[in-house]
Amino acid sequence: MKKNPPFRTAQILLLSLSHFVHDVYSSFLAPLLPLLIEKLSLSLTEAGFLSAVMQLPALMNPFLGLLADRISLRYFVILAPMMTAIPMSLLGLAPSYGVLLLILFTAGISVALFHVPAPVMIARMAGAKKGRGMSFFMTGGELARMVGPIIAVGAVSLLGLTGFWPIMVVGIVTSGILFVRFRSIDLAFHNRGTKISLMTTFRNMRHILMPLTIILIARSFMHGSLAVFLPTFIENQSGNIWMGGIALALFEAAGVAGVLIAGSLSDYLGRRRMLLLSLVGAPLCLLTFVLSGGWVRIVALLGTGCTLLSTTPVMLALIQEHAKESPAAANGMFMMIAFIARSSVVVLIGLIADWTGLETTYLISAIAGLAGIPFILMLPGQNSHED
């Protein structure tokens, strides 16, 4: 019987750190959105479309995954922090809406090149503890989205919207470090002699991908409305861009705790049960956030972040457990579905917000989030806890 490889803590932490640096830059859009709206006189619909354009390269994810199952994509992972840092540091210099769309599309390509092979690499390094490995990896991303808004707002406050571009140097240096440490690591995950088509991969995984699609769409209403428009919502109420950045940082900080706990817990409680706990709690917390004020609102925001953002490592572990023949291609399909769901829903959220206001939009998003709960029960149980 083939033994699972050991949990490679040092390599997993290094890749998680690169995830942190990469996602710090990719998180710049939301906290700077109020300033970009003001500078370029954008509607909320146009603002929502910015996030959608950044997600558009996710359409390539299944094909990137197919490549990752057959050839080494180490340089995609190595170069991604630099390739994302440069365009995201140039957001404030965009002279028009069209140029801003082009910058975000370029950054989106880099985001896709990083996020398809990296989780599969984590799964291989984690052995039997895939949930724990995904928790470490996703903690890097959630920490980035917690710290990123503060970094973005702080850089703009010190250097101005058009002058904060030198912070790209951190991403460039990170890629240099990854080159030294990862250049000899093979990121080809599957037997190169085996050619498995995307259609075959989908047929093998459809019993998981189809329920997850509905779950992701329902989740995207809550995630998209908060991750993209929370700073704008808070600034509209308080008139303070710092308060918006702090609110987003609190939301992401709670997500860090949720991500770190949920993946490891799902190794023991089961993936399906952990998803159910998370996606029952998130809509209830979001409703409380909208309908309350003061300290209750803060606690509700933290609860929303903890429950809502904790689902990603559980889903990634679920995919990797069932994608035995083509893990990277399956991950690419999942990432494509996730990004398309979120980007399309964000545009819809922008339209709803233009018609009804952000407060009503959040109420609608919470109710939409409840629609995904029945589909969790369609997912296969991981172990005896769920059978």
Image: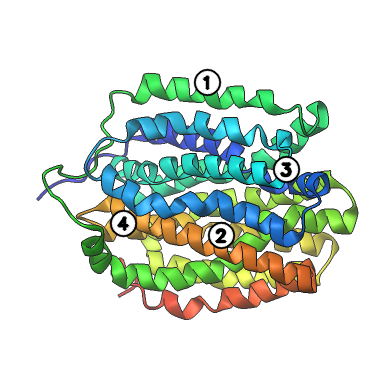
Task: Give whichever of discs 2 and 3 has the lower sequence position.
Answer: 3
Q: CA distance from mark 4 to mark 2?
A: 20 Å
The front one of 354 and 321 is 354
**Residue drawn at 37 percent across, 72 percent down:** 210
**Residue drawn at 30 percent across, 72 percent down:** 207
Q: Secondary structure at mark 1?
A: helix
Q: Which mark is residue 218?
A: none
Residues at discs 2 and 3 in contact (Cβ within 8 Å): no
Q: Position of residue 178 (x, y in %)?
A: 42, 25
Q: Which mark is residue 173?
A: 1
Q: CA distance from mark 1 to mark 3?
A: 30 Å
Q: Is residue 302 visible?
A: no
The residue wearing badge 4 is: 330
Task: Give whichever of discs 4 and 2 has the lower sequence position.
Answer: 4
Badge 1 amino acid: Val
Badge 2 amino acid: Ser
Residues at discs 4 and 2 in contact (Cβ within 8 Å): no
Task: Give whichever of discs 1 and 3 has the lower sequence position.
Answer: 3
User: How would you rate the neighbour count of disc 3 (Cα within 10 Å): few for under 14, some for 14-19, many for 20 or more?
Assistant: few
The front one of 317 and 107 is 107
Left or right for 128, reference 236: left
The residue wearing badge 3 is: 96
Q: Secondary structure at mark 3?
A: loop
Q: CA distance from mark 3 to mark 4?
A: 37 Å
Q: CA distance from mark 2 to mark 3?
A: 21 Å
Q: Position of residue 188 (x, y in %)?
A: 24, 38
